Image: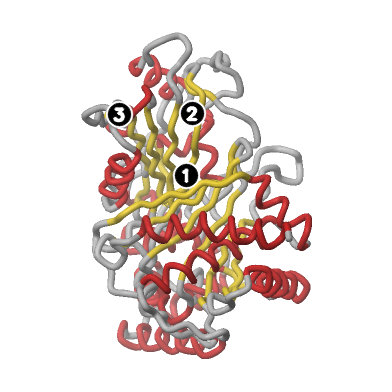
């Protein structure tokens, strides 16, 4: 039978609504190929030949009738590569600002649930002969580390594309609704305690479930001392803006070498400093004690399982709540406070499991699970102020059909009530900051991106004196 989504993977489907598109992705730019003009048709053909490396990319989600179990992955017998890989030429020479505007427009569009949950856009016409690739993959498929797997389809470690084994994919027959229902019932029977819990909750009135979920979220808010920060927590719409900042990895490492801690501590201090400068441009009152609570996801999914084989795709995430000291004027003090907070989390085992944040994951039928996750998403502004996700990327240059990749900016989704989410990925000695922001709540996302560059320079100068 087909693979069933885990409660956490399914939660990303349930949390999605009109204003909350739950896909991750990336924006990559490439230098012109030394061989001359880039062969787009050959590139698309190459992607198609490599889909066997990421089987999930030819599967779609099927709901179980009667919501008797969590959704499942099934092969899509009508899979069309041309639907998922699209060309988006801009009038050249296109500036980086125009590219970011295009990314913002594409980010706001939700993925089609009736098809495999990914899209890839080839953007031609950039200045200096460059082109770009924009990827969108639903969070139900991958976490931060897993999202790098999309690179297996298009990137190589040398200008010469590697050989790929022939792909002889033959879609498995799609199960009928009856088969899905029977399989869900049989699976539940193998876990009797879950059956009792599900039966009890299935009989509950939906209003009671919502009330219970609200109390659970309120308890979490109370336990974490949540408080909204107005510029960062706002009612959001469907449209997005995208901002970028880039800086040398060696600058981050130099600060760490002098001050101790980790590169991730430096990244969080950079975000804190950037937020501080940005809030000052908005005239926000700042006291030394002012903090912004960041939710910092930590992927605990191994790339290899215990047998040395590649781990299965999906999400296995924990997270820390970290107070970013935006009111602290001294950059080294900001870093010291962030490093101390992260060290305390790690020493005390204070990671907050992602299932805690959605509260009902795995303990309710999918219908009620969906209600709880949606409610938790709407309460996110009372639990944390900004998402900051740092995922290491490839340390060496990568190529697409001979064209060298220049940049790799990550895209992380916005939860309900969040004005901006910050993703960071390292690549070839450069740290790339990608800012996914609500179009109306954050028209000045470029100001925030520039402030992060300034915050790192401030840290480097302070550490060197």
Q: Residue furthest top?
A: 35
Task: Name which residue lies at 56% across and 23% down.
Answer: 156
Q: Residue furthest front?
A: 465
Which mark is drawn over residue 214?
none
- Count of marks overlaid on the render: 3
How is colour applied across the structure in the image?
A: secondary structure
Helix, strand or loop at mark 2: helix
Which mark is drawn over residue 153?
2
- First in residue order: circle 3 vs circle 1: 3
The residue lying toward the viewer, choosing from 372 and 322, is 322
Which mark is drawn over residue 80?
3
Q: Is residue 69 visible?
A: no
The residue lying toward the viewer, choosing from 204 and 179, is 204
Gap between marks 1 and 2 measured at Cα: 17 Å
Residue 169 versus residue 415 in the image, above or below: above
Neighbourhood count class around disc 3 (C-alpha, 10 Å): few under 14, some 14–19, many 20 upward: few
- Mark 1 vs mark 2, foreground winner is 1
């Amino acid at each position: 039978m087909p693979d069933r989504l885990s409660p956490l993977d399914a939660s990303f489907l349930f949390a999605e609504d009109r204003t909350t598109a739950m896909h991750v992705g990336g924006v990559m730019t490439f230098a012109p190929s030394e061989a001359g003009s880039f062969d787009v048709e050959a590139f698309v053909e190459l992607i198609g030949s490599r889909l066997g490396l990421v089987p999930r990319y030819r599967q779609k989600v099927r709901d179980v009738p009667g919501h008797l179990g969590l959704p499942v992955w099934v092969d899509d017998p009508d899979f069309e590569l041309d639907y998922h890989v699209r060309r988006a030429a801009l009038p050249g020479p296109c500036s980086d600002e125009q590219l970011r505007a295009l990314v913002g427009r594409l980010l706001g569009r939700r993925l089609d649930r009736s098809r495999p949950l990914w899209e890839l856009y080839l953007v031609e016409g950039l200045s200096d002969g460059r082109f770009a690739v924009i990827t969108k993959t639903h969070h139900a498929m991958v976490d931060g580390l897993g999202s790098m797997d999309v690179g297996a389809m298009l990137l190589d470690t040398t200008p010469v594309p590697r050989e790929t084994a022939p792909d002889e994919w033959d879609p498995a027959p799609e199960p009928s609704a009856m088969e899905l229902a029977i399989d869900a019932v049989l699976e539940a029977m193998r876990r009797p305690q879950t059956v009792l819990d599900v039966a009890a909750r299935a009989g509950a009135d939906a209003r009671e479930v919502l009330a219970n979920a609200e109390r659970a979220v309120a308890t979490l808010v109370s336990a974490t001392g949540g408080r909204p920060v107005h510029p960062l927590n706002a009612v959001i719409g469907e449209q997005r803006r995208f901002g970028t900042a880039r800086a040398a990895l060696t600058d981050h490492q130099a600060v760490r070498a002098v001050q101790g801690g980790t590169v991730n501590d430096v990244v969080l201090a950079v975000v804190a400093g950037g937020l501080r400068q940005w809030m000052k441009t908005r005239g926000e009152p700042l006291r030394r004690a002012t903090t912004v609570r960041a939710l910092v996801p930590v992927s605990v999914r191994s790339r290899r399982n215990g047998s040395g084989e590649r781990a299965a795709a999906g999400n296995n995430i924990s997270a820390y709540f970290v107070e970013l000291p935006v009111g602290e004027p001294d950059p080294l003090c900001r870093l010291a406070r962030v490093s101390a907070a992260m060290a305390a989390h790690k020493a005390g085992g204070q990671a907050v499991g992602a299932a805690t944040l959605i509260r009902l994951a795995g303990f309710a039928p999918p219908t009620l699970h969906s209600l709880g996750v949606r409610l938790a998403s709407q309460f996110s502004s009372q639990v944390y102020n900004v998402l900051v996700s740092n995922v290491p990327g490839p340390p060496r240059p990568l190529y697409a059909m001979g064209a060298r990749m220049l940049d790799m900016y990550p895209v992380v989704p916005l939860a309900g009530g969040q004005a901006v989410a910050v993703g960071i990925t390292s690549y070839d000695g450069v740290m790339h900051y990608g800012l996914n922001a609500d179009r109306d709540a954050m028209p000045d996302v470029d100001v925030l991106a520039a402030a992060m560059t300034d915050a790192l320079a401030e840290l480097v100068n302070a550490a060197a004196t």
